[in-house]
Amino acid sequence: MPILSKAAGWIALVGLSSATMTLAATPDAPAIDQHDATAATRAVLEQAARDLPAEDGRDFEFAQRGFIASWPDAVIRQDNGRPAFDLAGNDFIDGNAPDTVHPSLWRQNRVLRAEGLFRLAPGLYQVRNFDNSNVTFIATPNGWIVVDPLTFAEVSRAAFDLVRQHVADKPVLAVIYTHSHTDHFAGAPGVTTAQDVASGKVQVIAPKGFVDEVVSEWIIAGTAMGRRAFYQFGYFLPRGPKGHVGMGMGTAIAAGKQGLIVPTQEIEHTGESVTIDGVELVFQMAQDTEAPAEFNLWIPHAKAILNSETATGTLHNLQTLRGAKVRDGQKWSESLTELLRLWGGEAEVLLASHHWPRYGNDAIRQHLSHQRDAYKFIHDQSVRRMNLGQTPDEIAEDLRLPPALQADWAARGYYGTVSHNAKAVYDRYMGWYDGIPANLNRHPPVERAKRLIAAMGGREALHGAARSAYEQGDYRWSAELAHNGVFSDPSDTVSRTLLADSYEQMGYQAESAIWRNIYLTGARELRQGGPDTIAETGPNYLMAATPLGDFLGFLEATVVPEKAGDAKLAFNLVDTLSGDRFAVTLTNSVLVSEQGQTIPDAPTLSAPKPVLLGILFGQVPLEAMVKAGQAQVDGDTTPITQLATLLEMPKLDFNIVEP
């Protein structure tokens, strides 16, 4: 899951040191002109149902095995009474799939509905469907080890309350983060405190490079990722058969307070073991697979593998559609091969940080080998076709997994898909250019749209072609045509309507939850005339852990050349909290910050990091901070105050479905 960030927009002076943030719950937004499935969509989904694997009921049994208890109320609430997670939100997912949801996606969410506290093996428990991810509890003689404490403190605390009430009321002795994504660490304040960690009462264990990867993902491209994440996760879609039907990895995202409690120990090597209160855990490094910093766990006494997010109940993303660095499908498959070799022969329980466990050695070995083969097949066949001269679109159009993998529910594309994973493999090796000269320097979208419409004989001709494609059920083509109509003229209501209607039917037909969410969110924004908004209070919880140098790197990417012109600036910065010193210069519209350097005779601004950021991002006046004793300037303040006038802060509501 991404960090829903707008970077500098969350910079605040008050409360920064708390390193916590509150996000509003997913809104219960009213439906906007939701339509029924067309005859063409019904036909597609009826055929999809006939093509699905045979149902043996095993996933349902695995998901329900060991159930102990669930939360006593339909809603887990925040301290302010607002919902943190609506446990009844997916109650509509029952019985046969409606004609507005792919039957395979419907089935996956029926399995995911199993919620609450489960016993997986002696001393091994998991709470599922209190959030997008799972939290695991490993019992020790005197306490608990908590693995991946969810996205928000409120749901993490509720999960721990269930464990204490129904299993054993013992303290947390250790928290483990399997990897560097928000839904696996940001709920840690719900089960422990930074004070207990600092005092040594609680260990926090993570893979090598964990904090660096957490920070790097949110700071530079956090705004763009956040905006696109609203699409990927369907954040503003109302739950229901015509709206939000899960997210592929879970049913929904919770809400509440987030925090980062920094690890006290990093695992660096496969085979490293840690013993906590007599319970041994052994680690396998899985770096640069699903996350840049990730590991899997072997729990010897339970004969259990906790494989973080490297083998779940769906095909995963080699490149997440919200945006991120392309993942290495070959390395991912090699990691699963190693996992099989290490513990596959003796494991009796396989659990992950999403979805449901698997029991029995045969089922575990099959699951891990099928997941491994899926990633390797996509990698190898995309490379083979790439070397035959095929473009990303050509590779993705008809690449299919082998029959045995197509028949495995867990290798189906509820989250990642063969289509966009194949394109990711191409991008990893070849970049954005597909080798076709006509695509080397295309006109930008608005200009291209205008020229296309002119070439078709005008707007009425475009409308006719788009309408005809829609009526024939060719929604990919009607969407492409209508998209050009909207980009040529956003006030073109015929194109807007056709585009929204096309996206909606494509969403209904999608087996991938995130494809569905993207299409339906696009339709929603077209119909309501713009993006939804999100309310957040308090500073970003990652800010305290983010070095000043990373913020300066972000600042450097906000300089507007038209404003900067031929301006030349130079000054020094000193963070009085950390002692970090930077020399900052601006020439040729390029802002450069050099850590550990000083520019002689240039002014120097000294202040704690939060104050420095407030001044540099233009959120508080320099003079006011100096007057209040929060900052000190040696020299002329002009270069410092001038910089803020040359910047443009990114926005979390930029257009996607219209120019």
Image (cartoon, rainbow, N blue to C red):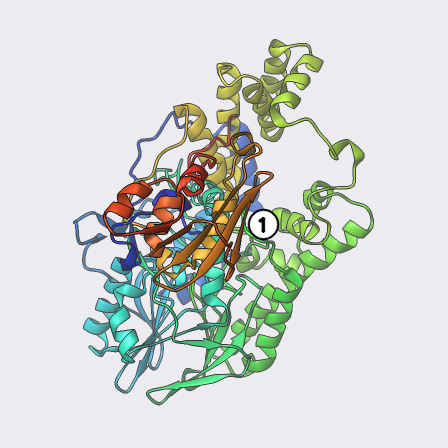
User: Relative to 444, is 361 on the left or the right?
Assistant: left
Q: What x and y, as percent, mark residue 65?
A: 36, 69
Q: Is residue 439 above or below residue 399?
A: above
Q: What x and y, as percent, mark residue 168?
A: 22, 78
Question: Which residue ends up furthest to the right in the rendered image?
Answer: 388
State the residue in front, 311 or 318. Answer: 318
Residue at 31% x, 34% y: name it.
29
Mark 1 neighbour density, 10 Å: few (under 14) some (14–19) many (20 or more): many
The answer to whether residue 402 shows anywhere in this view is: no
User: Relative to 422, is 603 on the left or the right?
Assistant: left
User: Relative to 222, is 135 on the left or the right?
Assistant: left
Question: Which residue ends up furthest to the bottom in the rendered image?
Answer: 278
Image quarter where the N terminus lies is bottom left
State the residue in front, 350 or 154. Answer: 154
Q: What x and y, as percent, mark residue 426?
A: 70, 50
The answer to whether residue 525 shows anywhere in this view is: yes
As shown in the figure, which amino acid type bears the numbered disc 1? Thr
State the residue in front, 556 or 447. Answer: 556
**Residue 59 found in image quarter:** bottom left
Q: Is residue 652 above or below residue 1?
A: above
Q: What x and y, as percent, mark residue 209?
A: 50, 68
Per the image, label 1 sits on a secondary structure element best described as loop
Q: Is residue 104 above or below residue 641?
A: below
Residue at 51% x, 29% y: name it.
657
Residue indicated by mark 1: 417
